[in-house]
Image (cartoon, rainbow, N blue to C red):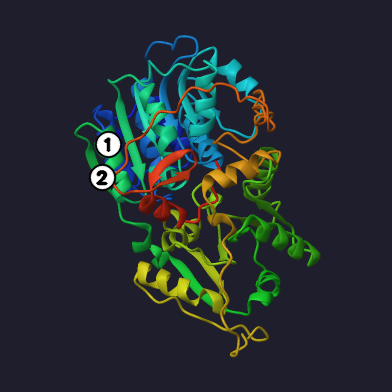
Amino acid sequence: MSFAELGLAEPIVRAVTESGYTQPTPIQAQAIPAVLKGGDLLAGAQTGTGKTAGFTLPMLHLLNGGQRPAPRHVRALVLTPTRELAAQVGDSVRNYGKYLKLSSEVIFGGVNINPQIQKLARGIDILIATPGRLLDLMQQNAVDLKSVEILVLDEADRMLDMGFIRDIRKVLAALPPKRQNLLFSATFADEIKALADSLLNNPAMIEVARRNSTVEVIAQKIHPVDRDKKHLLLTHLIKERNWFQVLVFTRTKHGANKLVEQLGKADISALAIHGNKSQAARTRALAEFKSAKLQVLVATDIAARGIDIDQLPHVVNYDLPNVPEDYVHRIGRTGRAGATGEAVSLVCVDENGLLRDIERFIKREVPSEVIAGFEPDPTARPQPIQLRSAEPRGRQQQRGQRRQGSGGGQRNSRAAQGRPAQPRPPQQGQPRPQQAPRPQQARPAGARPAQRGGALLSQPAANAQNSKRRSGES
């Protein structure tokens, strides 16, 4: 089957062909006809399956030839959890729509909001946004969503994990009741099903093979090593095996920065990407890595679903993730589109329990190889794993507001976004300013409220989300 046979307009097919694609992937072959019919869609697809083109191509087809949007109005809205994923979707829209007279814009936090306001003032056909920055623009009356014809929630499970559900519901309340809704998620957890039930109207359902059923194309290996020798082993592997363009995942932002310093001392070019980096630094690191000017990119899990690099040969789990699904997302950066790839995990005694959880999840045992000179101490005792990213999102946000450029889609720094700073609480003895009472939210009987990113959750739901150990950057 070709893209032309799916019913797409000739200018779109031409742009796809010039991008080097001739046959649709399974998710594209199923999603494109379903979206072209105009109905709602619930699609289960991992990153790397071609899902972005699965909704951008038919969206471009449906919008082509329509009326220009009014000032500040938007015809199609794509919500993504991270800046990197928003930029990736924006690239796809521009590449595939280059022969169409459709406008598009990507907006996210961490950069000046004023240029975004100016671009939205003209009206945009396709807006790709992270939830937090979109709400900022809505509060400033810089964007009007009453004309949205198509809504796409990309990586919906990731957005819920990062505590965006309250933001999403605020956006949904500003949309017209009659529209086409497309929801893409890597998993169909109960929270996703509940969101789909409230959002979608008699949707078509598509689920392609899960990434952990195609990991056979990825050569996975475990290297046992003492925790304090991990950086030495990684340096050894990179140099002895002539690795280049290596994506390395760490558990914490501090760990990522420290590893970059250690690699630099070994004359290995490396940069880190995480939420405490400015948007300019993150963009530069990604650009240098994609162009092969940078040998190693060290990332926290913010990048697990936001980096789209063809033929990425090596992924290294410097720290194993707490959640088995994250292991699958991480190694899914390599072995894309049928290509082979290598995923290496450096595992110390502290992480043996995490390794067992991962092997149960992927339903296979990962081969283990001890590297000569880096044999782990058999008498080493496990220590508790410090999860600096496991704190509730609200606390992360408070800390991020004290650091320049630390936030993203959520309100990061009011000064960085051109908004007035909130007044400090009054000193003792001073009267407090009058504030409107906050609306009470219903919760199940007996459930204790827990705060996460401003969303009021029952305690079990909050515990489930906090255990995901997300860094909460967007």
Nearer-N-terminus badge (2/1): 1
Q: In the picture, residue 200 is in which quadrant?
A: top left
Task: Identify the element where label 2 is drawn.
Answer: strand
Q: Is 356 or 350 nearer to us in this picture? A: 350
The mark found on residue 206 in the picture is 2
Q: Is 193 or 101 nearer to us in this picture? A: 193
Q: In the picture, residue 318 is in which quadrant?
A: bottom right
Residue 266, x across and y down, in percent: 78, 67
Residue at coordinates 80% horizontally, 65% vertically from top-left? 265
Residue at coordinates 37% horizontally, 67% vertically from top-left? 362
Mark-to-mark CA distance, 2 and 1? 8 Å
The mark found on residue 41 in the picture is 1
The mark found on residue 336 in the picture is none
Judge left or right: residue 78 versus residue 142: left
Q: Is residue 221 above or below residue 194?
A: below
Residue 459 visible? The answer is yes
Q: Residues within 10 Å of mark 2 (few under 14, many from 20)?
A: some
Q: In which quarter of the image is the N terminus?
A: top left
Contact, CB < 8 Å: mark 2 with mark 1? yes
Residue 452, x across and y down, in percent: 47, 44
Task: Identify the element where label 1 is drawn.
Answer: strand
Q: Quadrant of the C terminus?
A: top right
* Residue type of the residue flagged with mark 1: Leu
Judge left or right: residue 358 versus residue 404: left
Q: How crowded is mark 1: few (under 14 residues within 10 Å), some or many (20 or more)?
A: many
Q: Is 386 or 370 nearer to us in this picture? A: 386
- Taking the view exactly as shown, the residue that stands out farthest to the front is 429
Q: Is residue 167 above or below residue 207?
A: above
* Residue type of the residue flagged with mark 2: Ile
Residue at coordinates 45% horizontally, 24% vertically from top-left? 126
- Taking the view exactly as shown, the residue that stands out farthest to the left is 202
Residue 1 visible? The answer is no
